[in-house]
Image (cartoon, rainbow, N blue to C red):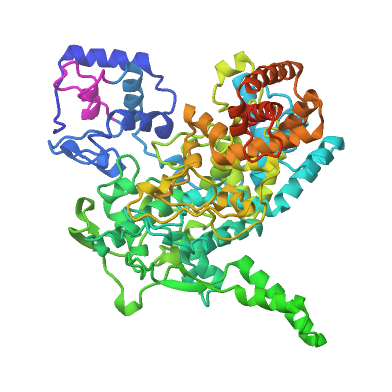
Amino acid sequence: MNFPCHRGVLILAVIAVIKFSSCSNSGDTIDFNTQVRPILNKNCMSCHGGVRQNGGLSFLFPEMAVDTLDSGNFAIVPGSTKKSVLIDRIQQQDPELRMPPEGPGLTEEEIGILADWIKQGARWDNHWAYKPPDPGIQAPELEHSELSNPIDRFVADKLNKEGLAPSTKADKATLLRRVSFDLVGLPPSKEMADEFLADNSSQAYERVVDKLLASPHYGERWAAFWLDLARYADSQGYQKDNLRPTMWLYRDWVINAFNQDMPFDQFTIEQLAGDLLVNPTEDQLLATAFHRNTMNNDEGGTDDEEFRVAAVLDRVNTTFEVWQGTTMGCVQCHTHPYDPIKHEEYYKVYAFFNNTQDSDKTSDVPNAMLLSTPQRDLKARYEQEIKKFRASGDTVNNTYQEALKKYFSIKPLKVPVMKEMPADSSRMSHVFVRGNWLVHGDEVQPSVPEALSQPLSENPSNRLELAQWLVDPQNPLTARVMVNRLWEQMFGRGLVETLEDFGSQGSMPVYPGLLDWMAIQFIHQHQWKFKPLLKQIVLSETYQQSSSVSPELLELDPYNRFLARGPRVRLSAEQIRDQALAVSGLLNQRVYGPSVMPLQPEGVWNVIRHVERWETPKDPENQNRRALYTFWRRVSPYPSMMTFDATSREFCVSRRIRTNTPLQAFVTLNDPVFFNATKVLAVNMHRVSDNLEKQIEYGFKQTLYRRPTESELQSLTALFGKTLNVYQQQPLQVTEITNGVDIRTPEMAAIINLAAVILNLNETITKG
């Protein structure tokens, strides 16, 4: 609809003056980002934003907001509320004329804010996330405080202002378990726990942190985090969902990159444009499989070009969500509804990715014959052994023959990689009218959105330059987005809750200064490296707080936004499974290698029309590898992990939304992997002692690194007696529940029940 000028009667003008004077204090400067933008986004943008510009008005760009309307009037005239039609319309009493046309209308306070803003000159401001953080930002100086970690000073300053106090430090067992899951994704080993719990020195905790950061399992834990963003899978997706049996080499590359603490700028460049580097190494080519995780559609009758285009669109959306925390998907069809990114700018970004050789073929061409880094290291080791034997002339013994056999068994595999089209065959890129790939608009050249490029001097022109632009220290988003992702992994909630959206519809940071300070530290102090930043976080007193919460604090801050207590969230799907295997002693801790097919319920893959066989390895060791190595088929992902909120990996997912459902209890009680782990833990409990109390104590110390409380001991003792009585009268149940166990007695069946309870405690599946 149009936005024509309405001449109100005198009484309405008088009412308006009264409203403005009573609702706002014109002596205060109105802040556009915190006061005005939220009002416009909530009430106006659906009709006057990026999708629609009814009446010729859009509040998305300042030049459009003050431009002439279709009616010839002006919605906003800086400095004059009388000439600004906006003010007249939002205060109208006639529902036919009032804006917004639906709902209760603006409150008196909101009208006052907009009026004062216009009086003060209607000054626009860039969204906070589009302005680079201040390189000179420092943590607050607090009086009478001995806090040495700047993170703690930011938090303490906020807590003081909110009238809150920090919690006491978590007990050692809880803290050890928390930091172990956070840094390596596994519970601490018995040796590490015994050593740490017995060490009362002030450096004990830091020593544990250093050991965990140096562990090869560190790379596995952080690879699991990254693979959701990379939409990694072992299949192509869509209806046929053909397999990609060699994609695991990319997963190995990611694990190795994290273990080597590869700087994030290098990590970025190699994945987005490793093929465009001068004389790229095998590793740099392998890294580009990041964007070959897009889906291929091999169903009969489909158009290869349509799905090639779909893959390119996905690369645009994924790149900007992962590195910029920007929701680009909607800009495929129209200008962004809320953020200043134009429709044609989407296709300028699309042009960066539109000249790769992949074309939705079943063969996943282009491919490269590659070894993963661990494979190359292993082959080099065998080569050295072979050389030593040959130098000594001893080439007939079995050790030499075995080394030779292993050396030649390590063969390169064909892996999908990115490769650019020849310059004389490059594609032209066009705007897709309303997002329709068949309807081409203007031709476009590679470029980044103007709203995001302002701090930078040069516009990138290819994928390599785009990657370099993303990790330019002046880029306002990349470092903020990444430190926010790390913070969410540690605390269960980002400083900006909407990890995927740093735009104006995303959450505001509760600690903007802390976010900016960590972003600057990440770039300059830590040189884009994760390990020192993570160490800085886990050594903070903020991280080490107890997660216990009083009723008063729970009411004041139910989601722990102010960080007055430690993190307490459920473990991830992978961690819950890995923990059950680890505490029972079943976990195969070998690092790297092909995907495996562990036990899962029969018939799960039957939902796939072109079914491949789910072939569980016969050797238990490969059945019990870490969840990270589970074969991931997009149409039918591993059911137990999906139940605990893992993603199908069809598209990039920035955060898994935690759910609580009865099905999760069915998994941890009855899934074959969990039930096997329960039985093995029970056998270990039985071996420790004939005394029930000591058996229960072993289960608790093995799982939670503490003794059971008197109440817990009484409850489990009573449960043992009750279930023992049942099993003594039901021998068939004993036979069923002890299947695969050497001791097949009612007592053993009852202990299996106790082990199941311990593995299903809320404390067990929660990082407290």
Q: Residue at x 32, y 31 (%)?
A: 40
**676 and 514: which is toward the camera:** 676
> In percent of the image, x 38 and y 48: which residue is there?
606
Q: Which residues are magenta?
A: 80-105
Quarter of the figure that contains the C terminus: top right
Q: Position of residue 117 (x, y in %)?
A: 35, 29
Q: Is residue 378 above or below residue 158?
A: below
Q: Is residue 768 visible?
A: no
Q: Position of residue 313 (x, y in %)?
A: 33, 56
- Residue 507's image quarter? top left
Quadrant where the N terminus sits is top left
How far across and down, in percent of the image, does residue 86 sit?
A: 23, 28
* 556, above or below 59, in the image: above
Q: In which image quadrant can residue 543 be found?
A: top right
Looking at the image, which is closer to me, 134 or 567?
Answer: 567
Q: Is 81 inside the magenta-drawn segment?
A: yes
Q: Position of residue 641 (x, y in %)?
A: 50, 41
In-image side of 397 versus 331 (left or right): right
Is 707 part of what is drawn in magenta? no
